[in-house]
Image (cartoon, grey):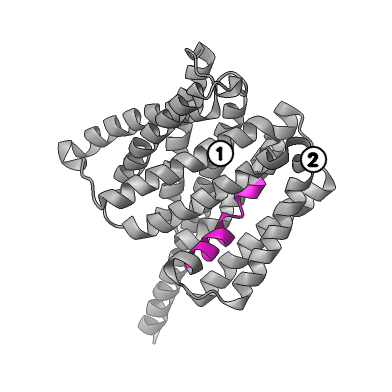
Amino acid sequence: MKNHDEADNIDSSLQTVGQTSARNNIGAALMTTMAGFALLSTGDSIIKSVAGQWPSTSVAALRFLLGAIGLGLFLYIRQGREGFILPMPFHQVARGFCLAVATAAFFASIFLMPLADATAIVFISPALTSLISAIVLGERIPNYVWHTIMLALIGVILVLRPNFADLGIVAALPLVAASAMSCLMLLNRKVAGSGSVLLMQFLLALFAAPVLIIASVIGHFTGLPALSVDIPSVNVILVCTIVAFTASASHALIYLGTTKASASTVAPTTYIQLIVALTLGAVVYHDYPDIQSLSGAALIILSGLYLWRRGNAAG
């Protein structure tokens, strides 16, 4: 009898240790991904500091050119020449194009409007991904997704309202960024498992940079002063270098978080970006959102969280 009691105590202790370890892993995962997403918004805030000094397409091009060089060197150190492969070439080029459009549009938007507003609108991406999946892939959209999309669109309208009054159609740039990001997410599904995470990051930067360089050249020859490309200042080069590093570091932290817990568990931590954007926008750039903008941002976040929750329940 005593042996049975001791065995039960051991089993109970092992279960407790296992539960504690699992909780610790989830806690570490959440903290790691939060740090990664917070670093992303910090990088966006740093990029905003060079508004007016160089065109957004050129800033994005330099950021990804430096990123491709850095990631390429890291890939070579980690995997050698064998690491440089090109699985599913068409999809990789398409990923780079989508990222180039998303980044150029987002950088332009934060140059022109409050950081928090642009960041909030980009969070409509999960709803847009569902919509694009239905249109392009023929996936059936449940009724709750349609309701969520409508809720997110109402939020976008609330956030955009004051910016449309000041900027006109240019205020829709974050929607362009969100749409391109949604397409990127769909393409990421297609290439998932075809190479290491580091390789996928490298290929993204590698194919995004030329698109943005071409866009910069075209912009320069339009003759528009805002798109004129001259020799970048030391400050612009420094900012692009810092953001190339912070973006790579943030993606590494996010990936590390998903190795400690499932992607669905850590997904809600992405909304830390909006909190950081609101804080940095107010403190650094003195952009204070009104109640209507905050309400719109809340609706967008609620729609994303609802999609995440229903997706988990369905899974």
Q: Which residues are magenta?
A: 120-133
Residue pushed farthest left?
82
Residue 174 colored magenta? no
Residue 20 visible: no
Residue pushed farthest right?
291
Mark 2 residue type: Ala
Q: CA distance from mark 1 to mark 2?
A: 19 Å
Question: Which residue in the protein does label 2 denote?
Answer: 165
Q: Magenta region's main secondary structure?
A: helix
Measuring 62% from the left and 71% from the top, which residue is drawn there? 146
Measuring 79% from the left and 42% from the top, which residue is drawn there? 162
In front here: 200 or 2?
200
Residue pushed farthest front?
222
Q: Is residue 139 above or below residue 264?
A: below
* Dot 1: element: helix
How many numbered tags mark residues here?
A: 2
Image x and y of residue 161, in percent: 78, 47
Q: Nearer the viewer, mark 1 or mark 2?
A: 2
Mark 1 residue type: Ala
Question: Which residue in the protein does label 1 denote?
Answer: 105
